[in-house]
Image: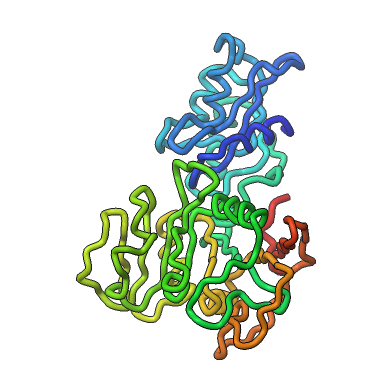
Amino acid sequence: MNIAFEEATKGVETWTNPQVGAVIVKDGQILAQGHHEKFGGPHAEINTLNHLDNIEQAKGAEMFVTLEPCSHFGKTPPCVQKVVEVGIKKVVIGQQDPNPVVSGHGIQYLKDHDVEVKVLHTTGGINEAYNFYYQKKRPLVTIKYAMTLDGKINQAGKTRCIITGKEAYHDSQNVRANNQAILIGENTLKVDDPQLTVRDQTMTFPPIRAVVVRDANQLTDDLKLFQDPASTVLIFSEQASDQHFPDNVEVLVAKNWTPEKILTELTQRNIESVLVEGGSHLQADFVQANLVDQLIVYVAPKVFGGASLPAIFNQDHSKNRLFEKPQVCALGSDLKITARRLDDVHRNN
């Protein structure tokens, strides 16, 4: 099973599908191993069967798979049918799939067709956002920001300030790549004019870029956000706009957007993880709503002082939220602090 979990981590383009790995064993020998490589492609069970020298080898063999095999028609046929068809005699499963479309049905199908099934009830430390999404019925929310030693994220004024060094920058790009949506507020859009893309790697399924704005008419065509036609952008607006946007831009119209409403929209789009990058007020709204599951903070050896903008700041909000003992690591001259919410029981085994 450990080999199967290692295989699973090789699947880096699974998008909203989980990472899954599988190993086929017979007479104490590994015959094949494989993983779910990309969204829409063959699942781990089928990929592993395809790696056999001869499909007849599967008859009487055992399969170790990190997640319950699917039993429904989606982008691919049900894996359990193929497992039964080729004669696998026993399936050892890491965890039952939390997706209600699959959960328990794949296991029951195998049992109904005389395949021995054993469930280990372990996630192997993968698919955290996937599991959280189906357990909590909303995306896993991470707040990320860089700050100075005195807790400031930007100097006074409307000019973007670079706080951390290149090591923290590259790490933050990896954090982006591991989330399915990036969320910012209107002030961050105006001051930083960000691309909200992952610059260190080419992604088939880049994060959706979401922006909370009061009026879509305030957005100009020259924003960097609109210069990348490959990415989808969700614009949350309080009033309708007659402005023409590129085809990859979806405008959502409603009054009084709240973190709960935003997450509802993302949930309906099967987004399992969202990275709230800015700004300070929007992040404070998520803290106030008790919807922050993880904090990632980069701390630079600088002091801005004065009227500089503090992190997670809103004069109308005041909440005491507890987080677990943080993990701290050095990135060049900066520190990276990662902390999980104290009451988060939906973590990986």
In this image, 229 relative to 201: left or right?
Answer: left
The answer to whether any part of residue 328 appears in the image is: yes
Left-right relation of 118 to 109: right
Give the camera-side residue of 270 and 304: 304
Compared across the picture, whether 250 is left or right of 156 comes to left
- Residue 103 placed where, x, y %? 55, 45
As drawn, the residue found furthest toward the bottom would be: 316
Please give the name of the residue rendered at 69% of the width and 82% of the height, measured from the top-left corner.
Answer: 320
Residue at (49, 47) in percent of width and height: 16
Residue at x 56%, y 85% (from the top left corner):
314
Q: Position of residue 117 (x, y in %)?
A: 66, 32
In the displayed structure, would residue 79 be above or below residue 297? above
Q: Position of residue 45 (x, y in %)?
A: 56, 28
Left or right relative to 264: residue 131: right
Locate the N terminus and report the quarter of the image it occupies: top right
User: Which residue occupies 74% across, 15% down?
Assistant: 29
Q: Residue furthest left?
A: 242
Q: Is residue 315 above or below residue 52?
A: below
Count numbered badges in the picture: 0
